[in-house]
Image (spheres, rainbow, N blue to C red):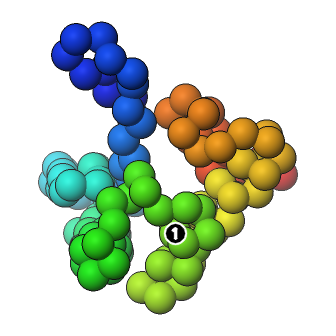
Amino acid sequence: MKMQPDGGGPRKLRAAIIGFGLDSQDNEQRLSTGETCLLVGGSAETHAEMLETILRLESELDRLGQDLADVTPNELADIAWRIDSPELHDIAVRLKTGLRSSGRAFHDHSAEELTNLSAPIDL
């Protein structure tokens, strides 16, 4: 997500994780937000699993004294491994591979480019 500060200064890229649960069979609307996340939808079980992962991630970032935006893809992959999140680990590995392929640094990419780099490859 790009943020343009007041005064027209340089942009600051702010990292966030957005999770969508698509398996809900009921009419419940589930939404959770945190410092680094937005979680939308899903069955009660899926939403709870997404929330638990984010809480573990935020706890680990707090323990390390880091913000999500300051974590390298390698560090994110390590954190994901420690908090037992294979999905987040896969995203971090795809992001690391995409950044290496592009030859540009994390902060030199737009939010859209970073999203595309971390997306699963369609087979």
Left or right: where 38 falls relative to 12: left
User: Is any atom of residue 3 visible in this view?
Assistant: yes
Residue 49 place in picture, x, y as percent: 32, 75
Q: Which residue is mark 1?
A: 76
Q: How many marks?
A: 1
Residue 73 place in picture, x, y as percent: 59, 62
Left or right: where 85 falls relative to 33: right
**Which residue is painted at 32% across and 17% down in the image?**
9
| Quadrant in which residue 5 is drawn | top left
Closest to the observer, 31 or 108: 108
Mark 1 is surrounded, within 10 Å at the Cα level, by few (under 14), some (14 to 19) or many (20 or more) other residues, namely: many
Closest to the observer, 98 or 7: 7
Left or right: where 22 falls relative to 58: right
User: Is any atom of residue 30 visible in this view?
Assistant: no
Helix, strand or loop at disc 1? helix
Image vertical order of residue 12 relative to residue 117, above or below: above
Disc 1 residue type?
Answer: Leu
Image vertical order of residue 118 relative to residue 42, above or below: above
